[in-house]
Image: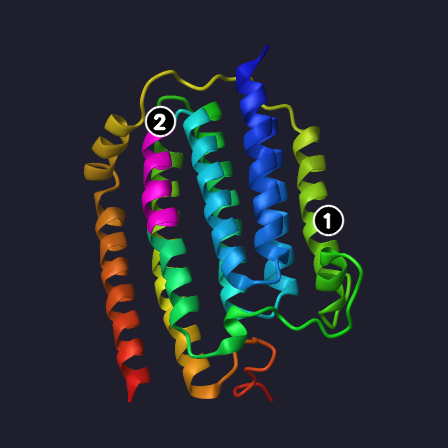
């Protein structure tokens, strides 16, 4: 039997990797991928807590379904914005997209 | 031999290695493919947690839709530098070293990620969770029932959100054409 700790630690390290990617990389598409990694780590946490602490209730799984929905919407809109910026301004690096930065 | 534990360790190693490659691999198409590997691994974790419905929609939505969208965006984009290797500004020995050297803050992102992971591990180890066990039943039937009864309103709101996101993405794409 895997304990609840195992899943939580795995999710923490996955979130840490995603956090590092979102902070360190400058390519906008890779930042979106790192955010997907973080959302997945959160989902592992939700499902693990739901299955271990409230067996028989599906609240955590329902929440994970909504997180997946929001992730799909975020990927669609985010990639559309990134492609639009890439086409109009010719850059994909987020530290060079500084039009609204003073 | 504890097969559940062995499976968990294999899945965890695959997920963490694939996530590491997502973050650090030089060619972004490779990063997208490694993302698919990591997401399939997470689907395996869901299966191990007896959440078979979530495993199925993880493969369908994440691997089938989101990774495909990302690869399409990379392939269709007009910029060469999306597809090719990211330029490393200062250089370094290892791949991680190059990634560390390529940002202005140097070690700060690595420190943030490691501190988060180790801090959460430390916090988890201090807490004694009530020892439960994963229920043996399937999750699809209660999940479907509660989505249609208790969580009907959030379910509808989520579908409206998806519709709005779809329309918004199409509008952005059309506006970029002109």
Check the image and report above or below for B104 versus A23.
Answer: below
Check the image and report above or below for A58 versus B156.
Answer: above
In this rendering, position of residue B72 left or right of residue B86: left
Query: In the image, what residue occupies the spot 31% across and 22% down?
Result: B138
Residue B77 placement: quadrant: bottom left
Check the image and report above or below for B35 versus B133.
Answer: below
Residue B69 in picture, x, y percent from top left:
36, 60
Query: In the image, what residue occupies the spot 21% across and 43% down?
Result: B152
Q: Residue furthest left?
A: B148
In this rendering, position of residue A60 left or right of residue B146: right
Evaluate whether residue B111 shows in this view: yes
Nearest to the eye among marks 2 and 1: give it: 1
- Front residue of B60/A72: it is B60
Rounded to the nearest angstrom, the CA distance separating label 2 from label 1 is 33 Å
- Residue highlighted by disc 2: A57
Which residue range is magenta in the image? Answer: B51-64
Please tell me the numbered disc located at residue B115: 1
Query: In the image, what residue occupies the spot 45% across and 32% down?
Result: B44
- Front residue of A79/A60: it is A79
Residue B143 in picture, x, y percent from top left:
28, 32
């Amino acid at each position: 039997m895997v304990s609840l700790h195992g899943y939580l630690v795995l999710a923490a390290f996955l979130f840490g990797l995603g956090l590092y990617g979102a902070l360190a990389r400058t390519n906008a598409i890779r930042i979106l991928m790192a955010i997907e990694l973080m959302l997945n780590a959160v989902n592992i946490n939700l499902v693990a807590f739901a299955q271990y602490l409230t067996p028989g209730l599906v609240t955590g799984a329902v929440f994970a379904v909504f997180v997946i929905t929001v992730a799909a919407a975020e990927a669609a809109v985010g990639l559309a914005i990134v492609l639009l910026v890439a086409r109009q301004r010719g850059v994909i690096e987020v530290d060079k997209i500084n039009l609204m930065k003073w | 031999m504890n097969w559940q534990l062995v499976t968990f360790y294999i899945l965890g190693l695959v997920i963490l290695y694939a996530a590491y490659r997502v973050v650090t691999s030089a060619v972004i198409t490779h990063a997208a493919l490694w993302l698919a590997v990591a997401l399939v691994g997470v689907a395996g974790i869901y299966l191990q947690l007896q959440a078979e419905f979530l495993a199925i929609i993880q493969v369908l939505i994440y691997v089938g839709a989101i990774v495909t969208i990302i690869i399409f965006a990379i392939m269709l984009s007009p910029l060469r530098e999306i597809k090719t290797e990211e330029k490393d500004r200062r250089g370094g020995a290892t791949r991680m070293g190059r990634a560390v050297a390529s940002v202005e803050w140097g070690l700060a992102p690595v420190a943030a990620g490691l501190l988060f992971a180790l801090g959460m591990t430390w916090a988890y180890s201090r807490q004694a969770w009530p020892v439960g066990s994963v229920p043996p039943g399937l999750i699809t039937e209660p999940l479907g029932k509660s989505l249609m009864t208790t969580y009907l309103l959030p379910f509808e709101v989520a579908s409206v959100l998806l519709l709005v996101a779809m329309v918004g993405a199409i509008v952005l794409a059309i506006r970029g054409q002109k």
